[in-house]
Amino acid sequence: MKRRILTGERPTGPLHLGHFVGSLSNRVALQDEYDTFIIIADVQALTTNFDRPEALAGDVRQVALDNLAAGLDPGKVCIFVQSMVPAIAELTVFFSMFVTVNRLRHNPTIKTEAAAYGYTDMTYGFLGYPVSQAADILFCRADLVPVGEDQLPHIEITRFVARRFNELYGKVFPEPDAMVSRIPRLVGLDGAAKMSKSMGNCIYLNDEPASVREKVMSAVTDPARIHKTDPGHPEICTICAYHAAFNQGEHEDIVSRCRAGAVGCVACKKRLLEVLEAFLEPMRERRLGFSSRRVLDEILESGTERARREGEATLGMVRPAMSMDYFSGKGLE
Ligand code: ATP
Ligand code: MG
């Protein structure tokens, strides 16, 4: 049997180059080797967007479409909607009994995100979303989780949950490994923070060529560089970071020419545009192939159906391990 991958996103808007570099690229590359589950984490989206659930329906489809456009083959991978897999909710409840509040409070990603959202008092659901995420990963007994580096503390909690469950009740779960990509964190167009929807510093996978052009041409480079012959500082340049991510072959050469003042920022941006267009254009074509609502919904429905069956199979191991299979007939003889 193939080993399993679980990964995915919260449906809170379109996916961007940061998502691709941080996690989509790995899941696309590994889809033949691994039995791959892609979660569209709509319940997790509610941790911050509980006051506007009506936005989910559009974003669920958007994220599914972005994944398909990025190159996931629906004949190979299972793309499913979190809220429609009851086993995930059930496991979240069981796991929450043995994960302490202190463990959740000390999670550095939760602290950073709470500060970014301006939360002075966190909801129970927000503080506890790493437990729900453990259930997302363990419901299908995944072995590997390709993620951005901000997710590493959460994967540690998932590993703890698997270990603790197995110790308490008997071995049901594998202890999954995180897989961080070559570029763990892609900087945003402003050069100040990671590329992130809420920062408005993104190139989206569904951006049109004109928009990509405008964004690249106005991206922040090396502010100290006035003339193109001034020696540049590629280590602080956004465009250079994008060359590293999307133009690995030429990156070293571009870095040394930038340092020597032998290539200007405009030329460097134009080259990046060519590279990005060669990367985005096939995605636009694949996107068209999945853009009928009927086709997309069928993919999501059949993926969700399969995820439900996997969840039931896992609960079929969890309940007896916890001696909670009361009416299974065992002990009646
Ligand atoms: P928001 O602004 O709403 O937080 P976002 O654009 O940061 O949205 P998330 O939904 O938080 O996107 O990201 C999902 C996951 O994708 C992240 O946890 C991370 O693993 C990966 N990811 C997001 N942005 C980047 C990035 N710039 N570089 C690498 N990985 C990223
Ligand atoms: Mg984020």
Image (spheres, rainbow, N blue to C red):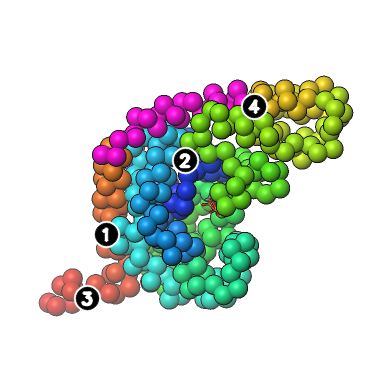
Q: Nearer the viewer, mark 4 or mark 2?
A: 4
Q: Is residue 161 visible?
A: no
Q: How dense is the environment of label 4, judged by Cα within 10 Å: few (below 14), some, or many (20 and up)?
A: many
Q: Which mark is residue 272?
A: 4
Q: Which mark is residue 27?
A: 2
Considering depth in this image, is 168 or 272 the residue closer to the camera? 272
- Badge 2 or badge 1: first in the primary sequence: 2
Report the residue at 40% width, 29% height from top.
Answer: 286
Circle 2: element type: helix
Q: Nearer the viewer, mark 3 or mark 2?
A: 2
Q: Amino acid at mark 4?
A: Leu
Q: Which residues are magenta?
A: 273-294
Q: Report which quarter residue 191 is drawn in.
A: top right
Q: How dense is the environment of label 1, judged by Cα within 10 Å: few (below 14), some, or many (20 and up)?
A: some
Q: Which mark is residue 312?
A: 1
Q: Position of residue 139 (x, y in %)?
A: 36, 58
The residue wearing badge 3 is 326
- Badge 3 or badge 1: first in the primary sequence: 1
Q: How dense is the environment of label 3, judged by Cα within 10 Å: few (below 14), some, or many (20 and up)?
A: few
Q: Are marks 2 and 1 in contact (CB under 8 Å)?
A: no
Q: Is residue 77 visible?
A: yes
Residues under labels 3 and 4: Cα distance?
A: 62 Å
Residues under labels 3 and 1: Cα distance?
A: 16 Å
Q: Report which quarter residue 331 is drawn in.
A: bottom left
Residues under labels 3 and 2: Cα distance?
A: 39 Å
Circle 3: element type: loop
